[in-house]
């Protein structure tokens, strides 16, 4: 699933926040034990897991209870292998 600000066929979760790039990052569930992997897609403002900026193009695991931040406003928490998206206005959207 691609997270981004751009309305396009490739973006599955559109976030209308200026610090999120058009196609910002990808979230995937791997076949290897259902790990949740996050890859920054060369975003302008970065993708962070637990405060550490991800290297563009390299997949990093989002562990249970972990937090990923897109830009500086959109946060995702991983609970029971289900991402929960919270933007800076505190709206919550569960990805069922």
Image (cartoon, rainbow, N blue to C red):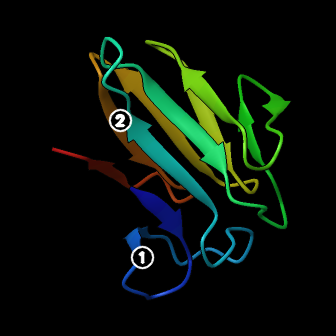
Classify mark 1: residues with Cα within 10 Å, few (<14), some (14-19) or many (20+): few
Front label number (1 vs 2): 1
Image coords of residue 59 (percent x, y): 63, 35
Mark 1 or mark 2: whose residue is earlier in sequence: 1
* Residue identifier under label 1: 10
Q: Residues within 10 Å of mark 2 (few under 14, many from 20)?
A: many
Horizontal side of residue 71 vs 55, given as left or right: left
Question: Along the line of sight, which residue is nearer the eye, 84 or 91?
Answer: 84
Q: Pick the quarter of the image with the N terminus.
A: bottom left
How many callouts does the rendering have?
Answer: 2
Q: Position of residue 67 (x, y in %)?
A: 58, 27
Residue pictured at 43% horizontal, 87% vertical: 8
Disc 1 element: loop
Q: Quadrant of the C terminus?
A: top left
Q: From what the image shows, is residue 5 above or below residue 60?
A: below
At a point 36% along the width and 16% down the height, the residue shown is: 32
The quarter of the displayed image where residue 24 is located: bottom right
Work out which residue is located at the far left of the displayed protein and give it.
96
Which residue does the image show at 36% across and 84% down from the upper left?
A: 9
Left or right, 33 with respect to 45, comes to left
Label drawn at residue 40: none
Where residue 48 appears, as percent x and y from the top left, is 74, 37
User: Looking at this rendering, what residue extends furthest in the bottom direction?
Assistant: 7
Q: Which residue is mark 2?
A: 83
Q: Could you say whether the residue bearing mark 2 is in a helix, strand or loop?
A: strand
**Cα–Cα gap, marks 1 and 2:** 19 Å
Residue in the image at 27% along x and 16% along y = 80
Q: Is residue 20 left or right of residue 92?
A: right
Asked whether the beta carbons under mark 1 and mark 2 sit within 8 Å of each other, the answer is no
Q: How far across and down, in percent of the image, does residue 58 sit? A: 72, 38
The residue at the far front in this view is 31
Q: What is the quadrant of residue 66 in the picture? A: top right
């Amino acid at each position: 699933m691609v997270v981004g600000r751009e309305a396009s066929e490739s973006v599955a979760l559109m976030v209308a926040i200026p610090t999120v790039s058009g196609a910002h990052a990808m979230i995937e569930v791997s076949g290897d034990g259902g790990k949740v992997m996050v890859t920054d897609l060369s975003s302008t403002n970065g993708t962070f897991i637990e405060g550490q900026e991800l290297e563009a193009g390299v997949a990093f695991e989002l562990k249970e209870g972990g937090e990923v931040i897109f830009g500086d406003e959109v946060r995702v928490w991983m609970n029971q292998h289900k991402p929960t998206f919270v933007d800076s206005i505190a709206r919550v959207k569960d990805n069922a």
